[in-house]
Image (spheres, helix red, strand yellow):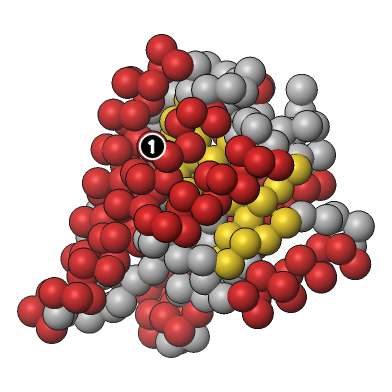
Amino acid sequence: MWNLHRKKILITGGTRGIGHATVIETLKLGAQVLFTARSKTEVASFEQELQEQGLPATGLAGDMADAQRRQEISNWINAHWGVLDVLVNNAGMNIRKPTLEFTVQEYQKILEVNLIAPFELSRSLHHLLVQAKHPAIVNIASVAGFLDVQTGSPYAMSKAALIQQTKSLAAEWAKDGIRVNALSPWFTETSLTEALLLNEAKLQDVLSRTPLQRVARAEEMAAIIAFLAMDHSSYIAGQNIIADGGMSATALLTPVI
């Protein structure tokens, strides 16, 4: 059972960071994978990379905040698979700036991509998930959803709401056999955090708050996502798995003598 053999999995935002690592992890565990990204070039490049590694997967380009594109994804899965075992809502975005500097268009876009798109995609794929034997949804949230980590308020708002969306859908859709969980990473080496982590002062601030004294690797998050997708996690539902190197468990990092 420690595999994903024959599982059909959709991973949004699959060409970079955590999504990229999750595509590779789930393929190695035996899954059939469909991944999405906004860039056609990145999708084609990643498909070629996977093919060369002997891990073929299908990529579709499109913004998951686009209702028409979401419907096209649903149509593809219905036509090619007829069922969906696992949905990984990973696609996300952020703009880092003070609250008063956001335009309406900027913060609405963040909410649309990070919150509304996972909600609508989960709804549009519900009929395919219920056809699976042990269906699951994994939402990629963030520690920013319950702690202020200076990511910008719209991002934090979107992730806090995504965590509650996870709990609500887990309770409502349990009767349909669909498990819904979330993963909340701390700072992880991805394109979203690259610029910040290149700032030595910011990096040292992050490390000073993290007992494990390092940022996470995308592969470590992918392993958690894969576990939540497995049948071995069959009694885990409505949970927000916090993977933060011990950050949220500590009040003082200086030893008390």
Give the number of marks: 1
Residue at coordinates 53% horizontally, 45% vertically from top-left?
74
Question: Vertical placement of 194 versus 126: above or below?
Answer: below
Specify the farthest residue to the top.
Answer: 175
Specify the amino acid type for callout 1.
Answer: Arg
Residue at coordinates 28% horizontally, 78% vertically from top-left?
96
**Pointer 1: what residue?**
123
Residue at coordinates 61% horizontally, 34% vertically from top-left?
84
Residue at coordinates 55% horizontally, 51% vertically from top-left?
73
x then y, percent, for residue 69: 47, 59
Q: In which quarter of the image is residue 75?
A: top right
Please tell me how crowded label 1 is: few (under 14), some (14-19), or many (20+) other residues with Cα within 10 Å.
few
Give left or right: position of 23 versus 188.
right
Give left or right: position of 221 versus 91.
right
x then y, percent, for residue 200: 45, 86
6 or 28, which is in the foreground? 6
28 or 80, which is in the foreground? 80
185 or 80, which is in the foreground? 80
Specify the farthest residue to the left.
Answer: 100
x then y, percent, for residue 151: 29, 69
Question: Vertical placement of 133 versus 91: above or below?
Answer: above
Q: What SS does tag 1 mark?
A: helix
x then y, percent, for residue 149: 28, 64
For residue 14, say whether it is visible: no
For residue 118, say whether it is visible: yes
10 or 2, which is in the foreground? 10
**Image quarter hosting the N terminus:** top right
